[in-house]
Amino acid sequence: MIPIAFIDTEIDPKTKKILDIGSTRNNGDSFHNASVLAFISFIKGAGYVCGHNILNHDIKYIGHALNEAGISQANIIDTL
């Protein structure tokens, strides 16, 4: 099975600062932290990432992290 990470971000609407990144992998591992570097480490090795409205929202804040982790734009699943 190709690993997948389900993700969501919480962003301060005024400052646009990342308040939290939450993620769960299909193996049951979970992540909650505002650190983009820690998030990159957590999602490395995932073949896909999935999130609700990820393409119009989350990608603005963590797109560089997905790229750094080696996740292709073609492997981003948006549930919206």
Image: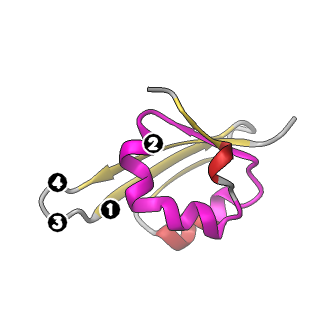
Q: Residue 60: percent from the left, percent from the top?
A: 38, 58
Q: Indicate the position of residue 20 as horizontal and vertical percent values.
A: 37, 55
Q: Position of residue 78 (x, y in %)?
A: 52, 34
Q: Which residue is mark 1?
A: 18
Callout 3 touching callout 4 (CB < 8 Å):
no
Identify the image quadrant of the N terminus. Answer: top right
Disc nearest the viewer among 2 and 3: 2
Question: 2 or 71, which is in the foreground?
Answer: 71
Q: What range is drawn magenta here?
A: 41-70
Q: Quadrant of the C terminus?
A: top left
Residue occupied by mark 2: 54
Residue occupying the point 64% across, 60% down: 42
Q: Amino acid at mark 3?
A: Thr
* Secondary structure found at label 4: loop
Sequence order check: which comes first, mark 1 or mark 2?
1
Q: Nearer the viewer, residue 47 or 35?
A: 47
Query: In the rendered view, does 45 fall on the left or right side of 9?
Result: right
Disc 1 marks which amino acid?
Ile
The residue that label 3 is drawn on is 15
Give the label, 1 or 2, closer to the camera: 2
Q: Nearer the viewer, residue 5 or 80?
A: 80
Residue for badge 4: 13
Dominant SS of magenta comes to: helix
Q: CA distance from mark 2 to mark 3?
A: 19 Å
First in sequence, mark 2 or 4: give its number: 4
